[in-house]
Amino acid sequence: MQTKTGTEEQMREQLHVIAVDDEPFNLELLKAISLQTYPHMLIFTDPKSALEHISSNPVDILLVDYMMPRINGIELMKLAHEINPEIMTIMITAAGDDEKVKLEALKMGAIDFLKKPINAAEYRARISNITKLKLSQLILDDFNHQLQKEVSKATQALLQREQEALKVLSNAAEYKDPETASHVARVSHYSKLLALKYGLNEEEQEIIFYASPLHDIGKVGISDALLLKPGKLDETEMDAMKKHCDIGWKILHSSENPYLKAGAIIAKNHHEKYDGSGYPQGLRGEQIPLYGRITAIADVFDALTSKRPYKEPWPFERATEYLQAQSERHFDPQLCELFISHIDEVRSIYEQFKNA
Ligand SMILES: [Fe+2]
Ligand SMILES: [Fe+2]
């Protein structure tokens, strides 16, 4: 959008005005009586050249003669409005043109009419009105444009603060866990990659990017004695540990925030298994929400390929074989295949966040 600034007079002088009439004499006359109002008015005797000009230049006001050979004034106005709907048009009619012409011109969007022979005083009064109208429209457009810019700046700032808060929350979620900040970063990126390859839109990819690190937030409700216990957990201890899924859900689910809502779904479902042998609900196949199925792959793959106090990192090949073997058992087979077929992109995320 073009914007015009300055005093009303300066703005008026910046207006782009063109006049089209097949009679050079009429045009010269029009130009002469317009000089004060529109010192830079351009004139065209050929409607086609006028249209070419409109196609590649800004035009605010169009003065057009009705009676022209080949393209008449109404046709020209119609084509001009197709190129630039913001143009304001004044139609110039001759004594012989009937009322039908006027009606049609009005329907096509003409703002005003002038009768030939042109009366200079009437003409000036009419173009003064149309100029005021055009200027108010431009000022309003400019104001809307500024407003839009302000709104998008404010939205951006709000989004940034929200994402910062989510990062802090994710760090808190991992704080009680032996897992590291680089695990959080990789799970985010692996989950987003899977969301993208699965065909989720950009908004959903962003949501899973920020929500997937919240998968273990429920561990804040599990005792340190249990969380940090070396070696295998017995059945009672395992049952207590499994509660972190429901605790995570309880912490997050009541929020209206889409990231936290998704976080709640992921916290609850990231230990479900495709064959129904997971927890907490033993959901099966597509009963398990998609975000949960995605995060399960990202989380397990990263745990396998990371060093933990009780194990060395698995090489990618071994971890990939494990995913393959667990396809349809632990993991959604379609997501598993997508993850494996884009293993090069997975590896570059791994390299990028190896020691983050
Ligand atoms: Fe977990
Ligand atoms: Fe994790």
Image (cartoon, rainbow, N blue to C red):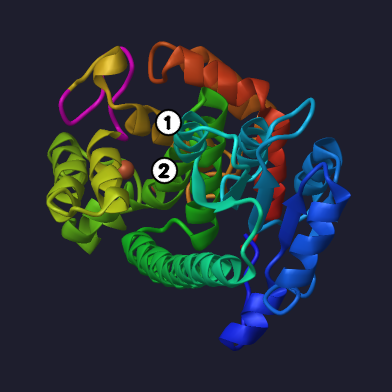
Question: In front: 45, or 194?
Answer: 45
Q: Mark 1 points at which residue?
A: 294
Query: What kind of residue is marked 1?
Result: Ile
Tell me what residue is drawn at x 25 percent, y 54 percent.
Answer: 257
Given this view, does label 2 or label 1 mark the residue nearer the observer?
2
Q: On screen, 231 above or below 225?
A: above
Question: In front: 115, or 328?
Answer: 115
221 in the magenta segment:
no
Callout 2–callout 1 Cβ contact below 8 Å: yes
Q: Which range of residues does the magenta coloring cover?
A: 270-281
- State the SS at label 1: helix
- State the SS at label 2: helix
Question: In front: 3, or 121?
Answer: 121
Q: Measured from the top left, where is residue 156 in percent x and y?
A: 46, 66
Quarter of the figure that contains the C terminus = bottom right
Label count reads: 2
Is the residue marked by circle 1 packed among few (<14), some (14-19), or many (20+) residues within 10 Å?
A: many
Q: Mark 2 points at which residue?
A: 208
Q: In which quarter of the image is residue 287?
A: top left
Query: What kind of residue is marked 2?
Result: Ile
Q: On screen, 343 above or below 326?
A: below
Tell me what residue is drawn at x 59 percent, y 28 percent.
Answer: 319
Q: Measured from the top left, where is residue 253 in percent x and y?
A: 16, 48
